[in-house]
Amino acid sequence: MTPNAVPAGQGRGGLLKKLLAAVRAEFRTEIYRPAPDDPVFVAPACSVADCDRIVSMRGLCNGHVIRWRHRGRPDMEDFLADAGLPVRGRQALSICKVAGCRYGNFGKGLCGKHYDRWVRAGRPGPEVWDAPDLVAPGVAPAECRLSFCTLWAEGPQKIFCRSHHERWTNAGSPHPERFAMDCELTGTAHIATSPASSRWNSSTGCSAGPTPTAARPRPAP
């Protein structure tokens, strides 16, 4: 048998099948997200309550470290007691002020649709303007594709709210599912298990850096 020969019955398809069978199911994906108590990888969470990003230093994620420094490096207990609004990418976007409307703010506290109707009505004062209902009773538009955003998608042919649609467009309109995944992974522990999954991270407006954030291996005992 020559050095490069493959035993009979073990072509490339057979070898691939054996390799996949030996790989745990959670690794058979483009992106692996280890749990905080993973026995091999460590992904400590930021000490700020309800922050899902991983620690950069001093028990804080990069965004909260920057905020802590801007405040003059206060005592950590005091900072954690009042860390402020969620860091970039997790803050709730402003919403239309018309009751019951969940489209994103466009101007004057109104969504683009209500703003247009307000202008056509002669820009009346809020106390006299009877803002129209834009949605039929009991039929709410779909929400933005990003799981942490509760605003309505800007239109029936769109899957993002106004702000995230604009961010997606500014990023060059990448594949919507790739864009959504990148936004949701920003600042969290994850490992790209294929070259393709590391390339698309750099271009979207939600990205915090040019490459995915790799979880750190647990030190050997």
Image: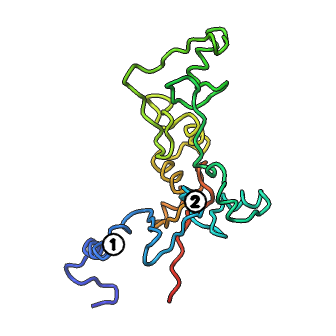
Which quarter shows the N terminus?
bottom left
From what the image shows, is residue 220 above or below residue 76?
A: below
Residue nearest the observer in this picture, 55 or 9:
55
Residue 82 found in image quarter: bottom right
Residue named by callout 1: 24
Q: Residue at x 38, y 69 (%)?
A: 27
From this viewpoint, which residue is outermost toward the right?
72
Kind of residue indicated by mark 2:
Gly
Farthest residue, direction left: 9
What's the CA distance linking mark 2 and mark 1? 25 Å
Q: Secondary structure at mark 2?
A: loop
207 to 220, vertically: above or below: above
What residue is disc 2 on? 187
Residue 119, located in which quarter of the rendered image?
Answer: top right
How many residues crowd mark 1 within 10 Å: few (<14), some (14–19), many (20+)?
few
Q: Where residue 97 sits in the image (x, y, percent)? A: 59, 26
Residue located 63% across and 50% down the image:
88
Residue 157 image offset from top left, x and y in percent: 44, 30
